[in-house]
Amino acid sequence: MSQVDLIEDESATASIVQRTPRQIAWTRFKRNKVGVLSAAVAIFFILGAYLAPLITRVMGLSSTKTYPKTLNDYAMPIGHAGGISLSHPLGVEPGAGRDLLSLLLYGSRISFTVAFIVSVASIGLGMLIGITTGYFRGKLDAIVGRFSDFLLSFPGTFMIIALALPLRERVEALGIARDNGARIIVLIFFFVFFGWPGFARLIRSQAFSMRERDFVMAAQALGASSWRIITRELLPNLWPTAIVFLSISLPGYLAAEAVFSFLGVGVQAPASTFGLVLSDAVTYWRDDPAYLIIPSMYLIIIVLSLNLLGDAIRDALDPKAVAG
Amino acid sequence: MLKYLARRLTATFMVIVLVSISVFMIFSFLPMDPARLTCGKACTPAVVEGNRHRLGLDVPVQVQYVRFVKGIFVGRDFGEGAAKFSCPAPAFGYSFNKHECVTTLIAEAFPVTFSLAIGSFILWLLVGVSLGVLAARRQGKWVDKASTAFVLVGNSLPTFISGILILLLALKFNLINPIEMGRWVSPFKDPIGWASNFILPWMTLALAYAATYTRFTRSNVIETSSEDYIRTARAKGLSEKVILRKHTLRAALAPILTIAGLDFAGLLGGAIITENIFNLPGLGRLSIRAVLIDYDLPVILATTLLAAVFVVTMNLIVDILYAYIDPRVRVA
């Protein structure tokens, strides 16, 4: 720092620039190199997923087209590492011979969409229910509390597996969507159904203690309505919790979607998701290990970057939290 | 304490009844006919109706539920005369597709799932807690950094990927025999065969859980270490070892045991992914096969209920243990 700056600083102490908590968090986040890097990686993959049609068109590829010339007589990719070449940067799928990059781009679009919708919906629902029960307490709180306890004791994974098939048939019978569209709707519904109680509980306990704080009492004394207190006083204070929760649940649901399609209850072929590609890759692992390793790494890098990003956001929003 | 125990027991009982009723209701309102599912391609209207009667599906849902509960306590017969199947208590139904009482199927699968759960549970507690304590004691040193890396990897590696990678590496280096894989070996007859059968699934499950436990233990130990009573213990001249063992760990590990209990209960219901990858004939594989292959409703119903009962019961055990450790809970 130069001499001039110092003098200016001293003269400016009387009027320190005020910063909002959001600005403080942003400055803190920018200082975290790992956080910024993982944010860049995550954005890169998210853009890749949603620009999949554009990217594949520019590269002259398609996720549904097969490239029989890249396969040998045994339907195995020609060349090293799963047939990696300039025209197929991640190689080709053995058997059918589709382009692996396009499969993963389109597959990650499904995974990201499911993860986004589920995270936002369960946080929205959890926020609404958590705030109302935490602020109004009483009978409503007791009933909702019992109900979420009850939901939390349900074996969620089992229920999803057992009910995915009949519910999909119901969705199709109602004419809402067909095939994979119906499968995705069912999966989203179940993830949200079993996902909100955890977050609602967290928000409830925070709203519960916050309504005893002075600023809420002051607002009540001024005659503010419950609606105003909830939206203007409580909500702004609960946003950090929601953002941290979002950053934790996003990679979780991303992986969960992959798991269910791997097990055969999620999205099915001809669509491609991580779970489908990987369960297919297992059958080829001896002859084409790259077909297994590349999609695994692709998914791991996405989940890892989102996890690191989540840690960085948490540290930025709550400096007291012990980085564990 | 007795009063607390009675209150918790009643509540648990109520939850189990409620869960069982709702699971039962959900499955009986499915848009599919369970009687039709029993015969596949050989279905004629007469066979379907016959099986409907034999399975007791021709009566109202509430009667079905009462019969189901009664079967758990006194056993149950399906059908009459020559076509009668008897399932002794506890009877959870009869699987037409497998021609077995569901209880028999569960009794075959449960030891596998239990072996898987108990082994990985011990492994992840050992690794997670000791790594967490070490990291907390040597904050900022290489052990701490290594544990942070371990936590990141463990948390970012979905079980189905780590399981596949572990399995394929083992196959590649001929560490396991693919034909032997998934064969149930009793630990009482052949303990070594049993352990070698389960070591890879144990590692797969433990990797994911140990990461979470390392993180949790580390932050708990660090938090407890700054408490006043730890400073007091140090001031009165206790050695670091004694402080750690008698004061820090005691407080820091209590919440960990709570989560551990619930995680263990969750696994007892069936570790679906791990069992699937390693071809282990446990409860998880039993239920997913029942869903994917022939939608074997009695099996699905029983495994789902069982999974719920494990969680609820373990919740009760954990609560009681907690009340034992922390007297404040009892009056709350």
Image (tube, coloured by chain):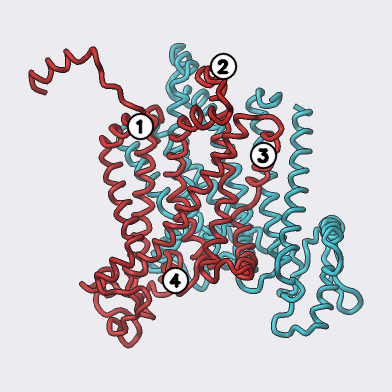
Chain colours: A red, B cyan
Residue type indicated by callout 4: Ala
User: For this rendering, which residue is in front, B113 or B310?
Assistant: B310
Q: N-terminal of the two: label 3 or label 2?
A: 3
Q: Quadrant of residue B259?
A: top right
Q: Residue at x 75, y 63 (%)?
A: B28
Q: Are marks 2 and 1 on the same chain?
A: yes
Q: Quadrant of residue B291?
A: bottom right
Determine whether the residue tagged by mark 1 lies in a helix, strand or loop.
Answer: helix
List the residue tagged with mark 2: A221
Q: CA distance from mark 2 to mark 4?
A: 58 Å
Determine whether the residue tagged by mark 4 lies in a helix, strand or loop.
Answer: loop
List the residue tagged with mark 4: A271
Q: CA distance from mark 3 to mark 4?
A: 39 Å
Q: Please identify, in this view, whether the residue under mark 4 or under mark 1 is nearer the observer.
A: 1
Badge 1 crowding class, 10 Å Cα cut-off, few under 14, some 14 to 19, many 20 or more, is few
Q: Please identify, in this view, whether the residue under mark 2 or under mark 4 is nearer the observer.
A: 2
Q: CA distance from mark 3 to mark 2?
A: 29 Å
Q: Are marks 2 and 4 on the same chain?
A: yes
Q: Residue at x 80, y 61 (%)?
A: B91
What's the chain of the residue with tag 2?
A
